[in-house]
Amino acid sequence: MPKSTRELVLEAIDRLQIFEAGQEVPAENYAKVKGKVFPLLAWLKAERVLDIFVNPQDEDSQDVPDHVFIPLAMALANEAAPAFGLPHSSMPSRDGTWDPLHRAVAEGPTYFRQQAEYY
């Protein structure tokens, strides 16, 4: 079952391990992580890794496919880490941050249209 943007942001916050289990996430911290969602998705689309549409008006709409939910949450946590004083991986392929996302989309649809090339 697809997940919502809210679930994606909360999973990324959980992976950052900056709050105790069951502790309420302050609105400003939630906003910091949520602010990274759309730039990350735009970058992934530009790099032709993943192209999914997440409704910016309704963060409860189920837009994130299951097969990319966890890897995308890991990537989002990596992008949001500096906002909380945690290290950010500038070379994510070396530490495995992007590897799960690449594996998730390598076997499934990327949702890009194939461009025909004629000679």
Image (cartoon, rainbow, N blue to C red):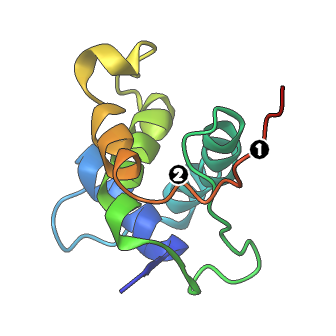
Determine the residue located farthest toward the left in the rendered image.
21
Q: Residue at x 39, y 58 (%)?
A: 108
Pick the front one: 60 or 85: 60
Dot placed on the residue nearer the N-terminal end, 2 or 1: 2
Q: Residue at x 38, y 21 (%)?
A: 92
Q: Which mark is residue 115?
A: 1
Pick the front one: 61 or 26: 61
Q: Residue at x 47, y 28 (%)?
A: 82
Pick the front one: 51 or 81: 51
Where is residue 104? Give x, y as percent. 33, 51
Please tell me how crowded label 2 is: few (under 14), some (14-19), or many (20+) other residues with Cα within 10 Å.
Answer: many
Q: Which residue is mark 2?
A: 33
Determine the residue located farthest toward the right in the rendered image.
119
Q: Write down the quadrant of residue 7 in the picture.
A: bottom left
In the image: residue 48, left or right of residue 99: right
Q: Mark yes or no: residue 18 visible.
A: no
Q: Is residue 17 above or below residue 58?
A: above
Question: The N terminus appears in which quarter of the rendering?
Answer: bottom left
Where is residue 43? Give x, y as percent. 66, 37
Question: The C terminus appears in which quarter of the rendering?
Answer: top right
Q: Secondary structure at mark 2?
A: helix
Where is residue 38? Give x, y as percent. 68, 52
